[in-house]
Amino acid sequence: EIDAVAPVVALQPPQHNYNLRPRQGRDYSHCYGNDEQVDEANFFQTARIPGVLYGANSVHVPEAFNTDLIAHHIMIIIATKVAAGETHIFLKQGLKEFGVKGEQAVYKELDVLHLQNVFTRQDPGCLTSNEKGKALESLMFLENKQTGAVKGRLVADGSKQRNYIEEGAAASPTVMTESVLITAAIVATEGRDVAVIDLPGAFLNAEMDEVVHMVLRGKLAELMVKVAPQIYRKYVTLGNKRELMLYMTLQKALYGCLRSALLFYLKLVADLEGQGFRLNPYDPCVANKLVTRAQMTLTFHLHDIKILHVDPLEVTQCIEWFKSIYGTDVRISRGTTHDYLGVMLSYSNKQVRISMADYVKKVINGFIEDIHGSASTPGAENLFQIRNEEARVKLNYEQAQCFHSTVAKLLFVTMRCRRDIQTAVASLATRVTEPDEDDWAKLRRVLKYLHGTAYLSLALDASNLTFMRWWVDASFAIHPDYKSHTGEVLLLGKGGVIGISRKQRLNTKSSTEAEVVGVDDASSQILWTNYSIKAQGYQINETLVYQDNQSAILLEKNGKQSSGKRTRHMNI
């Protein structure tokens, strides 16, 4: 059910390709650009998204970012801050703009990292030419915070590591969106206390498990020597361009290294297991422990952790334990409303309301055309209709990029709370490679619909957890290539906890066959949900799938015994 709520602050956070369901790999081509200040007004507008949105916390990286390929989780930090109105710029321009304040911010950041033993000095004479070539470049960003203060942030450019680290070997798991929604519905019904914590500088708690060298150049090397002259001065050397160079060996998982997020995840899991927590085997970012005869559940996305327990005192004690391990500078959210992984969760009356109003408005404002008024529905009757090639008018490059980016952002929304636009967005997602003016008009209609319904929220509970009800339907040969379209939704009580709308991958000969293919497509999600909820300690007595095609139901129940002339080719 969808109802109106107050405005929320929604940031967008990454979901990686580590978990049980395959996801497409990342494309870093969008990281190239000019070394210049990020323009907040054009931040979302100029983003070039590589075709799919990776999940919670996915980042729309502005083209203004240069420096080859900056590691994904660094871009998350930058993108989130820019979206909040804080500007990040590179060191050279930052020192020109901020002057003495900028230099002091850089010095302070280097001093903190020095005191935390994040790296040690490295004698360049002991490094081979190959080791020097593999040394990571250091990047210093200056952040102009809303308070007027200037903060420096040192990161490593991990792009060189891609030459010897296999794709996927550095990815850290993050909590699945389905797990976030399912646990939110369950704890709302059970009346558990909820807390969300953020562990600042979390990666620096993890030790490096390989030898990684990094080089500081120019002004960075000069300021690093000022931090501890007796330690670093004699290791300074000159590069080919007569610039100062200072080689370091990383001891901690500095932001930007490809494996930093994974190293932190492994440490976090080891710490939790040491306290008696056990991971859900179907989502390695959900952990459970029995505390005072009641279940405590943690869901974690890197350093963003949600703590769930019926006793607020136990939640407080858990927070204090995190402080003892990861430092006292922990940001804590208590109460009934929380901003977690890009969505606003509001708990009341044994249900949770999920909203992304601010994010929706940001998408609308970032569109290259003004959106006014509203539409009664997100899609019209011509949603799946495509003109002949001769009659199509393709979009220009700027419009095509905007179309691609906007559809990706809307996919992010549909998977979390806006089930009402899923079908329209799923259809538009099939058109991102060569959109035309008709597709542009369809996208504008979706945005107009959202403009009038930005504050709609999804209300969920799990009042009937032992009885899982799925609705699966298919629309036969609706796409221009005569493929069908599947929709599926799960109810555990009130509201669609899981909702999916997608194009089928194969052509079918009848509506009955399309319905059978739809159930087959949905079966993996149905089974995973069953296994995951059972692993949380809940008993599922029955799983029921609703369909509106009697022939398909008979085929699914009886197999070939219920096959007729038009379905005899199907091996069920």
Image: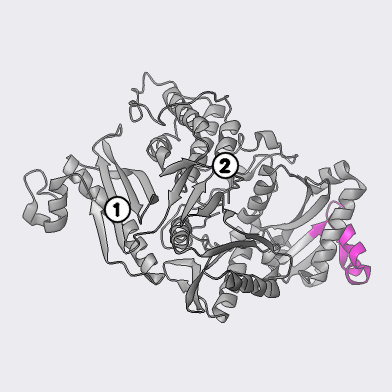
Task: Report how far apart the C-alphas of labels 2 and 1 lie in the structure.
Answer: 30 Å
Q: Nearer the viewer, residue 429 or 279?
A: 279
Please provide percent x and percent y for residue 208: 67, 71
- Find out whether residue 227 is within the magenta segment: yes
Q: Nearer the viewer, residue 138 or 438?
A: 438
Question: Residue sitting at 8 percent across and 52 percent down?
Answer: 562
Question: Residue sitting at 47 percent across and 79 percent down?
Answer: 293
Where on the picture, by quarter, is residue 531? bottom left
Q: What residue is pinned by disc 2?
A: 6
Residue type, label 2: Ala
The colour scheme applied to this rendered structure is one colour
Write down the region rendered in magenta. 216-242
Please report contact status of discs 2 and 1: CB closer than 8 Å, yes or no.
no
Please provide percent x and percent y for residue 163: 60, 59
Say above or below: 343 vs 246.
Answer: above
Please provide percent x and percent y for residue 541: 27, 67
Q: Label 1 crowding class (10 Å Cα cut-off): few <14, some 14-19, many 20+?
A: many
Instruction: Give the farthest residue toward the front.
Output: 349
Question: Residue sitting at 34 percent across and 25 percent down?
Answer: 382
- Can residue 209 be seen here? The reply is no
Say above or below: 93 vs 467.
Answer: above
Please provide percent x and percent y for residue 314: 58, 73
Where on the picture, by quarter, is residue 115? bottom right
Q: What residue is pinned by disc 1?
A: 470
Residue type, label 1: Trp
Q: Label 2 crowding class (10 Å Cα cut-off): few <14, some 14-19, many 20+?
A: few
Q: Quadrant of the N terminus?
A: top left
Quick one: label 2 or label 1, which is nearer the N terminus?
Answer: 2
Taking 261 as reference, is 184 left or right? left
- Find out whether residue 280 is within the magenta segment: no
Q: Secondary structure at mark 2?
A: loop
Instruction: Give the farthest residue toward the top.
Output: 391
